Image: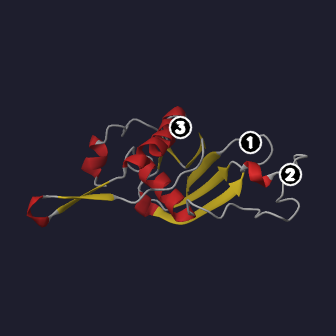
Amino acid sequence: MSEAAQASAPEADRSAPWVREFVLDVPGEPRGQARPRARGMPGGWARVHDAPENEEPKGRIQAEWREVGRPRLEPGRPIALVIDARFARPATHYLRDGRSLSAEGRRKPHPTGRPDVTNIAKLVEDALEPVGAFKDAAIVSGVTDKRWCVGDEGPRTRVWARVLG
């Protein structure tokens, strides 16, 4: 996104503090970036736009960013982005006595279905760039983990972004 486009973005806040790192804890089931949609236009052109199902999860991430004070990472610096996506265990993962089948070795210890880690990361990046938190091109290191919730923990996505060096 160009500087002019970022400045005109509705959420961009030029008075927000520059920080070296921030952490977001976004409640709710983690989601991945849905594929873009295309619509035919006159003259054989196609118009490509963001899928409508991306609005709600991006809105949750942006709301949490606003809640923690609209932090922005220092511009022009390399960024590390770590995402921890915690998914609710399905009821089929438990025995009648409440023990987890994963603990018994009869279920996968990690969620291996959709969404995949690259789509989770892309959704987070695309939610935070327009509000001015950072430029996704500056991300030089990224880790995204998918795990089951533990104990009473609810589903959530934790995002940790920091300036390297």
| Sequence order check, earlier mark of 2 and 3 | 3
Residue 156, image x, y percentages: 63, 45
Occupied quadrant, residue 143: bottom right
* Residue placed furthest toward the right: 97
Q: Nearer the viewer, residue 20 or 24?
A: 24
Tell me the residue that label 2 is attached to: 95
Q: What residue type is labelled 3?
A: Glu
Residue 82, image x, y percentages: 60, 57
* Secondary element type, mark 3: helix
Residue 24, image x, y percentages: 58, 43
* Secondary element type, mark 2: loop
Name the quadrant of the N terminus.
Answer: bottom left
| CB under 8 Å between discs 1 and 3 | no
Closer to us: mark 2 or mark 3? 2
Tell me the residue that label 1 is attached to: 153
Name the quadrant of the C terminus.
Answer: bottom right
* Secondary element type, mark 1: loop
Residue 125, image x, y percentages: 46, 55
- Residue 138 appearing in the image: yes
| Residue 64: mark in rendering | 3
Residue at position x 27%, y 41% in the image: 8
Closer to us: mark 2 or mark 1? 2
| Sequence order check, earlier mark of 1 and 3 | 3
Closer to us: mark 1 or mark 3? 1
Distance from label 2 to label 1 (Cα)? 19 Å
